[in-house]
Amino acid sequence: MNRLVSMTVNGEPCELSVALNRTLLDALRNEGSLTGTKKGCDVGDCGACTVIMDGRPVNACLVLAAEAEGAAIETIEGLQPAYDKPHALQQKFMEFGGAQCGFCTPGIIMMAKALLDENPDPSEDEIRFALAGNICRCTGYTKIIDAVRATAEELRRAGTL
Amino acid sequence: MKPFEYYEPATLAEASELLRRLGKDASIIAGGTDLLVELKEDLRSAHHIVNIKKIPGLTDFAYDPANGLRFGALVTVREIETSPAVNGNYPNLAKAVSLLGSIQVRNRATVVGNICRASPSADTIPPLIADGASLSVYSGGTERSIPLDEFFTGPGRTVLVPGDIVTGISMPAPRPTSGRAYIKHGRRKAMELATVGVAVSMEHVAGQCSDIRIALGAVAPTVIRARRTEDLLRGRMIDAALLAEAAESAMQEATPIGNVRASAAYRRDMVGVLTRRAIGYAMGGVQ
């Protein structure tokens, strides 16, 4: 049986008809046609499906779509301020080589955004702690952490945090 | 995930009646971080999912220095992790919740859900047992209290019957003489299931132990209290010789299995090491 779920996705109202056993992840990717959020392990271990739900980062694979009724969801698609202008995090990930195959990147960037929203000046330990649930199997984590630190610095300088 | 019927009862009475009627074929969903994984991996079958998030009153959180801590079944692990009252008064619980899964998981998972899942390696259970926590359980219009150390009957099994809903958990406030510690032992620092977890909650003055509770995780079919070891330490001056004796005693109380994460012998050895270490931390040793 399907249910009509109304939520806000990246600031815009979004109404999806989804089966009750559908996860938020599958609903976003299929019914919502937002494939930026990746499906990795599908059991909450890898973090590739990280989205921000009502201000908190969650694994979209462990949320029933029906539970997103009334929620505000942020995904990687909503991050850039304009079509040809990447978000500071995306820019720094490119500059620092923080992505290789790129599959884990949307989840890591959303988790990093949630961290910086809460803590504009994280230490390396705090970044590692925040990203513990995001697994990258291509590269090391050093460049990812450098990119997050550089973003934090830039955003603090620009006063946009 | 197989299809299921989905319910969102608005009251405890409605939820309890529903759960009693549906029987063992129904599961409560709160955080869902264990349940959805089990459903996806066919480790559990449930044709009826009862979401308790629409029930008012289950998100309450209260701490006061006289009555201690009480919070509802829908309070997330992350809320407990970031609570100043928990960090200031229950450092063992604070430590345990910071090591459970990832922030993404902790933002959804509930502490009561972690308890009701009844995993022998659950992170939240040892410190809560050591601190003397009790669960409030609602069923058909009445509420009863169950001490946490009498709640578990086996791996994944508890004393709950269909119609029971755990509504919250409470534990006494610490005293000036209280010392507490939790050590999680694993192969890596994050995203790990405990191979051994040891929680200690004690009352001590100038090296003298007047009371102590020790809870061991992942080394028996349920989290257990090391009661003989507690008896050995209660009323005694803690010194190196007594700590060695306590470590040996705790090892004898553990009944670990060997599995993919650690052998039985290794787990038993670590119970000794970590029990000694946790008592040291609880008495003010630097972690």
Image (cartoon, rainbow, N blue to C red):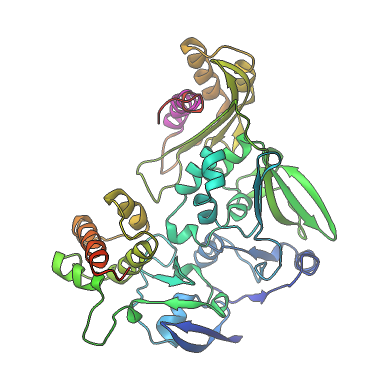
Name the residue rendered at 32%, 64% in the picture.
A112
| Residue B25 percent coordinates (x, y) | 69, 66
| Magenta span includes B272 | yes
Name the residue rendered at 60%, 12% in the picture.
B236
**Magenta span: chief secondary structure:** helix
B173 in relation to B55, above or below = above
Visible in this render: residue B191?
A: yes
Q: Quadrant of residue B15?
A: bottom right
Visible in this render: residue B121?
A: no
| Magenta span includes A22 | no
Please identify the residue farthest to the right as the structure is shown.
Answer: B141
Name the residue rendered at 43%, 81% in the picture.
A28
| Residue B70 percent coordinates (x, y) | 67, 48
How many labels, in total? Answer: 0
| Residue B78 percent coordinates (x, y) | 50, 55
Provide the residue span drawn in magenta.
Answer: B264-279
B211 in relation to A119, above or below = above
Name the residue rendered at 52%, 12% in the picture.
B242
A125 in relation to A57, above or below = above
Which of the pair A76/B243 is nearer the observer?
A76
| Residue A131 percent coordinates (x, y) | 33, 57
Q: Quadrant of residue B170?
A: top right
Which of the pair B219/A31 is nearer the observer?
A31
Position of residue B155 in the picture relative to residue A82 (left or right): right
Where, quadrant-wise, is the C terminus of chain B in this rendering?
top left
